[in-house]
Amino acid sequence: MNPNSIKGTLLVSVVLCVACSLLVSSAAVLLRPMQEANKKLDQQRNVLLAAGVDVDSMSSDEIVAMFNDETKVERVLIDLSTGEAVDVEAAGIDLATYDPKKAAKNPELSERVHAGGGPTHGISRREKYAFVYQIKNENGEIDKYVLPIYGKGLWSTLYGFIALQGDVRSVGGVTFYEHKETPGLGGEVDNPAWKAKWSNKQAFDEQGNVDFHVIKGTVDLNSAQAAHQVDGLSGATITSRGVSNMVQYWVGPDGFGKFLEKQRAQ
Ligand SMILES: Cc1cc2nc3c(=O)[nH]c(=O)nc-3n(C[C@H](O)[C@H](O)[C@H](O)COP(=O)(O)O)c2cc1C
């Protein structure tokens, strides 16, 4: 067949299209396990970052090894309505594949948000079960609790982690790993200098009620509330308010509050 004929041109185009689509789809299938592993590693890296671990000096293998050793990091699936660890068999959950982000959109695995009039994370449903990461010290005692947090900013849902110290009151650190806020404005949630301001802030009052605020402007260090406040991001009041609300929601009674209360009582 003459390749310059209409039939020839069509045949070459069809063969080329089929070959390219096969190549692209096989690459997608073959690379999926690697992408999944990288996604998991990124999450683990961010859990440690929130807890103030110097992850930049750690290799990927060292990070994975930490999460495979329950004396270093213990991941527990919590039933948010009771604050107790989930009986995964009874709940029919496979821990290897359970994804809280997907669960939040599944009517069977999620519930309506009922924060009792307090701030919410800006989304009408949330997952029933969420992971808590317990970071241990050399003696195997819990040094920090790292909780996943997410909620609406201005343009996007921000996903991150907040760490609470072993006293279950003071903040150990915060990090965001996914958002679409404006670089230089809401995107300053990623600024290490801003995140450093969270360390040792108090998330609860003496009675154990949530008392934590990202305020508009700069914290007055002489004020009695200073220990419960973090500077707002300038020019990004909406993102700052979103972050403030999501923290209040997730450490509060409709989030991890019941779990945290039990830990504090221990
Ligand atoms: C292009 C553009 C991008 C913006 N991005 C953000 C943002 O990411 N987060 C935010 O809170 N405000 C953002 N703003 C500003 C908000 O519209 C709003 O003015 C601001 O949150 C008010 O904050 P301020 O009182 O500190 O000025 C953006 C504004 C513009 C014009």
Image (spheres, helix red, strand yellow):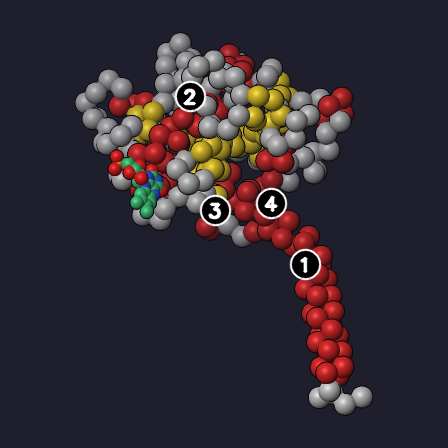
Q: Which residue is mark 2?
A: 119
- Choose between 12 and 48: the one closer to the eye: 12
Q: From the top left corner, tell me how far across and down residue 229 is, in percent.
A: 30, 25
Query: Does any portion of residue 119 appear in the rendered image?
Result: yes
Residue at the image point whose x is 37% and y is 11% from the top: 206
Instruction: Work out which residue is located at the far right of the displayed protein and give it.
Output: 1
Of the image marks 1 and 4, the number of the one nearer the N terminus: 1
Of the image marks 3 and 1, the number of the one nearer the N terminus: 1
Q: Quadrant of the N terminus?
A: bottom right
At label 2, counting other C-alpha atoms closer than 10 Å, the crowd grade (few under 14, some 14-19, many 20 or more) is some
The amino acid on which the numbered mark 2 sits, given as a three-letter code, is Pro
Q: Which residue is mark 1?
A: 28
| Mark 1 and mark 4: Cα distance apart in space | 18 Å
Q: Is residue 102 left or right of residue 228?
A: right
Q: Which is more foreground, mark 4 or mark 3?
A: 4
Count the labels in the image: 4
Do callouts 3 and 2 mark residues in contact (Cβ within 8 Å)? no
Does the numbered disc 4 mark a residue whose Cβ is under 8 Å from ligand 1?
no
Of the image marks 2 and 1, the number of the one nearer the N terminus: 1
Residue at the image point whose x is 46% and y is 23% from the top: 120
